Image: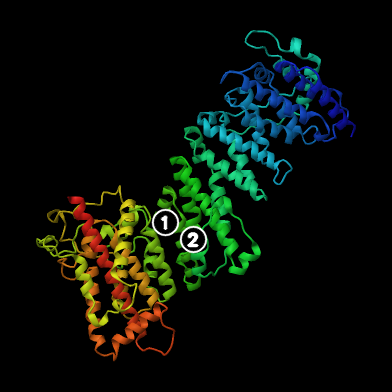
Amino acid sequence: MFSKITSILQHAVEALAPSLPLQEDFVYHWKAITHYYIETSDDKAPVTDTNIPSHLEQMLEILTQEERERDSGETGPCMEYLLHHKILETLYTLGKADCPPGMKQQVLTYYTKLLAHIHQPLLPHINVHRPVQKLIRLCGEVLAGPTENEEIQFLCIVCAKLKQDPYLVDFFLENKTKKPKPKDPGGSQMLKDNTLTLDTGQSLTKDLIDPQEESAAAAAASTFSPTTNNNSNNYNLVSSLLNLTRSPDGRIVVKACEGLMLLVSLPEPAATKYLTENAELCELLTERLVSFYKALPQSMDPLDIEMVESVNWGLDVYNLKEDAAVFTGKRALISFLSWLDYCDQLIKEAHKAAAAVLAKAVKERFFVSVMEPQLMQTSEVGILTSTALLNRIIRQVTSEALLREMVFFLLGEDGELETSPMSVHYPLRHRLIEHCDHLSDEISISTLRLFEQLIQKPNQHILHSLILCSLEERNYLENKPQEERETLENGQFHDAIFLCLVPDEAKSSYQVEGTGYDTYLRDAHRQFKDFCGVCLHWDWRGNPKPFEKCNLDLPFFEGHFLKVLFDRMGRILDQPYDVNLQVTAVLSKLSLLPHPHLNEYLLDPYINLAPGCRSLFSVIVRVVGDLMMRIQRIPDFTPKLLLVRKRLLGLEPEGITIDHVTLLEGVIVLEEFCKELAAIAFVKYHTASSSSL
């Protein structure tokens, strides 16, 4: 209580006294701090019971005022005094010793405010970046410690300064082994350092501060000198932030993650080299990703996984009770997706070399080690859950480097041409494609959704590996010259052919409002434009590979992926409605891709196929032929078809059981798919026509 009264009286006297020149005032406050270490006999009293916080605040205010009053970039005498007398070194040592108790917190706050409020570059000065580096080492030593908040604020302001001037990062890379120096109990070295002169050669201590007091402060500081760090190639800023990502306080974790994101984006080669050679950051990303994944329930509804709200790693706000009420595992799922989002964003922001290393680590330690066994298992429940999770991961990943490694994990890196359905170059890819035609309809649907997401990603290897490598030589064509595009030149559009494929008695959309062709045209135009944007730099536009340059003697195999899709399309009249919707969704996405060979193979009804080959059009024609025979055997086919359509649209309540419902639903999907293909063909043709004008 007495000390507080003394402080109040001191402030009152200072307010009434005439203001001192800034330099004298600054030295006065520093002398007041050093007096504490000379005069006090009770070093157990907390720092908040002393005047030290007030004097530090005044010193900071003086430095800020001095900078405001001087020309930009000019260093004033107060700042010169702070630099030449190594005040930050002394404060660091006292903070390290936490003498008096709570001093570490005060020192961290002072450093943070100094770096934040002073605009002139301070970190290039050795008497700033050296103590800053030492203070960095103290951060993150004790999790949930009393200074965690001040530690993270300090580290983040250092990161922000490095982001402004990336070259400064070299000051924070310790790449030489340091030898410990013997302590100097008398403080003579500190005293010597603290009496350095200005460029004029005039000693600052001579008139402004008593050498005895300075020596006493130096002696106090040397008593608490830190243990020297002997590690080589240290990037302590990264290490301290990594430690704080393990804090039980979520706010501290988020700030630490923000700091790491700033550091990985720095372009300096030395910093990038450290990040690519040191395993700490890779371990943090992958170990936590694996930990969150393993905390998920073994069985989850794919719809729950698909429908859970999008997550942003820094905004992971939740309510345990509410999450549990929605579905079991929601909290664990959000935690996993949130950390995945952080990994993705960190890799996206990282320097290219660092991003490649981080992404490869995620591939090896998470995808290969953890996810692959889940996807290759035989348990249907396990396959279903892991496939739905992988689908969600694919949907969420946006960084180029992580997407590339994920694609290599799923499809292999070589993109080798498949010669038959039995050729297995990459077991995981083969297994996933097989799952598109699984005995379990749920697994088939989930895997088809996965591929639908995958083919929309901006990665050329996906489409080359799954489809285009099989179509590259156009050896699906008969080995003779073809009258290319004659029908188009005569003004006959592909869309008219597709619209006429389904017989009139199998059409029902014209009898229901809102199911017309115009909707498909609008959607096709928008989606085709989106795909063109994705494929803009892939050099896909133009005509197919010249016929005379194609190796038509090479045996044609449509590829494992297209084979499974065509097989399922061929069974559209006999398989569940939801399966049919997903099969046609994938095929329509492929048809939208702006590659000339896909235009030909998937959309050209006049394609001159080689013997034994099939195209999408030929598969649909075969289905329609089968349908026309079946229609004859079903009484009241058209009224039943219309009733089923209305029920699917929710326009009619469920009532009497209708026979052949799977067939009728298949016919409806077939009609809609033909309309969709017609719209895509129309949009592609007119886009090509307008671009050639």
> Do the numbered discs 1 and 2 sit on residues whose CB atoms are within 8 Å?
yes
Percent x, y of residue 290: 55, 56
Image position of 260 (left or right of 649): right
Q: How is the image coloured?
A: rainbow
Query: Which residue is painted at 82% across and 36% down in the image?
Result: 46
Q: Quadrant of the N terminus?
A: top right
Q: Observer-nearest residue: 286 or 127?
A: 127
Res 366 label? none
Image position of 297 (left or right of 139): left
Q: Which residue lies under the disc numbered 2?
A: 371
Image position of 209 (left or right of 539): right
Image position of 609 (left or right of 275): left
Percent x, y of residue 48: 80, 35
Answer yes or no: is residue 587 visible.
no
**Helix, strand or loop at disc 2?**
helix
Above or below for 390 versus 148:
below
Sort mark 1 into few (<14), some (14-19) or many (20+) by Cα contacts within 10 Å: many
Q: Observer-nearest residue: 474 or 594?
A: 594
Q: Amino acid at mark 2?
A: Met
Most distant residue in the right direction: 2
Q: Quadrant of residue 196?
A: top right
Q: Amino acid at mark 1?
A: Phe
**Helix, strand or loop at disc 1?**
helix
Percent x, y of residue 359: 46, 48
Query: Which residue is painted at 37% across and 66% down in the image?
Result: 433
Q: Which residue lies under the disc numbered 1?
A: 409
Above or below for 199 versus 172:
above
Q: How many numbered marks have been drawn onto this rendered protein structure?
A: 2
